[in-house]
Image (spheres, helix red, strand yellow):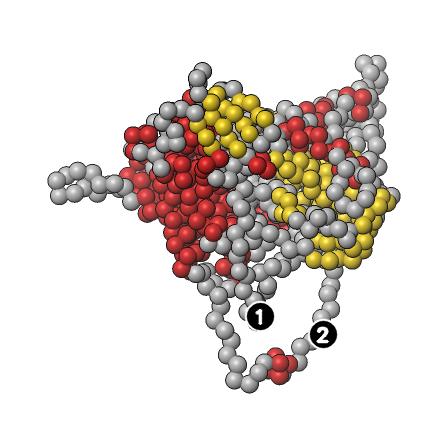
Amino acid sequence: MSPLLPPVDPSVTAQLVAALTPRLRKRLDAGVAKLAGRPVARDGDIVRLAVDDDTDLELHAPGGVVTTAEAIRCGCLLAPDCLHRAATASAAPVAEMPDPVVEIPDPVAGEPSLTKAPRTAPPTSVPVTTPPATAGSAADDAPAGAVDPAPESATPAQRTAAAALHDAAAAVLEAGADGAGAVLQAELLRAAHTARLAGLPRAAGRAVAVVTALRAARDADPAHRLGDLTTALRDVLLLAHRLPKAAGPELAGLRGRVRQPYTPDGSLRLYGLFAEPVLTSTGYAGTVTWTADAAGRLYTVPDVAPGGAARAAGSADRAVRIGDTSLTHRELSRAGLAVSGATVSPTGRLGAGAGVRAVRAPGTSWRAEPLDRLWAVPVAEQIARALASDLDVPKAQDTGLAGDTGDTSDGSTQPTAQDGRDGRDLLFLDVTLIGTVREAAGECLLADCDGLTVRLAAAHDDPALPDRENLRLLALLAHGRGPGTRLRVVARLTPAPLPRAVLLAASHPTDPDTHVDLGLDRLRRADLPAEPTAGTSVGAGDARPSPTVQPATASDEAPVHLLRRRVHQAASGGRRVLAFPGSKESEAARLRRYGLGTAGALLTALHATAAERARDPFGRLLPADAGRFATAWLGAAVYTEEVDRALCAAAWGASSPGLASR
């Protein structure tokens, strides 16, 4: 995937690939690889790509996005039926699909409206008093002889679109990332476009995420993570499996929502909490500033647009787009904001409509009210809230593409690329640094949090962002420059068998009343406590214990990785890698010995469906049943996710949300 090319609408890529002859389809992947590294020149809305020394290809991208097949013009003799147009569309980033006009029906009595979602609750539990309902109130309000209408079910077009998504995703899983070339990607994009038109933006967004992850894997992109591909593929198959039989509120959550509604929220007095960079695999970047009101309710001010790491790092110094204030995101994270006529989305995102007014106001320290109450919530309660947020289907109604469209001053909308986070996955922790540990992805901080050893990792690995460098400097606090340093941090939970989170912000090592946005601010060695001199003796009262790591708990030893490894292998190499003979019987037996009988049965079924091939009367092998293998793989993927969630809750000492939430 070339970041120099403009994003191309998924339907355009699908149309160009479908128009190729079978002979050209076989050469499509080679054509995509040939375009890598070719010179690209931009002139306004026109991007020119030098296919070779004598041929140029032009992409007309008004507004920065290629929306029609005719906008890609090639100068070769075979145009417009040439390979170059389809190869260029397959090499370009995937654009956000245009919003279809979806008729939203009126909510059924007793069911929530599809255009309204619950607001982010403050971290502290506040009792709400509601008047008791009388026994006959419901009967008095209902007309005589009224019959409760049947819950809304999926339309035939939505069922057809879900089936097409399932078949396309199953074909990708059958081939794996290694074999899912441009043709299979185009089929999945076509299914995503059909799903979008049928009013299934959530499934369409996850399908585009699969294509983006596939391209990153095949291009050996350093930012590629196999877990991201596995998660996106699992989501597509799970949504396609559940949509046809869903009804009522469940269907509304599975369908998703293209646009977030912004509702008036009166006047707000907000206090800056922290700011974090946003860098997505779909080509969006920027900054999101988190604020809180006097009750501890979280609000976000985003500035996300198409771009890369440079925009993510530079947007922190851009003025926030709310009212007439000149505050930058970096300043707002430490100051305050007084807003009148505020409009807020269900996830707490502030709108920037023409009637919104905002002025700068004094901020407050993390250790003063009202922000201090965020850290007063017990850790176990925060973990339970974060785990439940992933299971809340109605909350996850964003498309996953550009996330949401923000309310602007001219009445139009603009993409913000935030993925629907409402702050429930944020952790507000008081930790003591005790050491470091080296993992495959890099070094992590070890910190003590209420008796738990927590691993704190960097949120971004891109060298343009200071996350990794700041983490290395904070590691010095655990080795020589004041072991046992206590910090107040903001992190985002990472579900894992060990207590683990990604570090977003931390109190300053030498000034507890200020904080550092670890993805935007760069720490210096001068910001750390001074090193003790060689002649300085440490008194008995000043002696601190050496960094230690708690021993592994029973949850760490559960061999769920045996099943998870096979799930990831299938996503990477396809069905054939699980069809080879190996130690599958011993792995299933080991899972059963540890009491994971369901995991053993799922692993056995996964290998059986991968190796199952029928023959025709002449003894020739018939094509494998991709749908059956996809069903077995989906069961294993969902099971590992739920076990990881339960192990994560056990590691943190929190209650695990049940499967009923799904």
Observer-nearest of 199 and 271: 199
User: In the drawing, what numbered circle is on residue 131?
Assistant: 2
Horizontal and vertical percent position of residue 353:
73, 50
Question: Is residue 578 visible to us here?
Answer: no
Give above or below for 207 relative to 538: below
Please name the residue shown 48% across and 65% down the image.
152
Is disc 2 surrounded by few (<14), some (14 to 19) or many (20+) residues within 10 Å?
Answer: few
The image quadrant that residue 502 belongs to is: top right
In this rendering, position of residue 511 left or right of residue 83: right
Res. 22 image quadrant: top left
Sequence order check, earlier mark of 2 and 1: 1
Q: Which residue is mark 1?
A: 110
Which mark, residue 197? none
Residue at the spot 54% in from the left edge and 42% down from the top edge: 96
Question: In which image quadrant can residue 63 be found?
Answer: top right
**Mark 1 neighbour class, 10 Å CA radius: few under 14, some 14 to 19, many 20 or more:** few
Above or below, 598 against 210 in this view is below
In the foreground, 29 or 413? 413
State which mark lies toward you, 2 or 1: 1
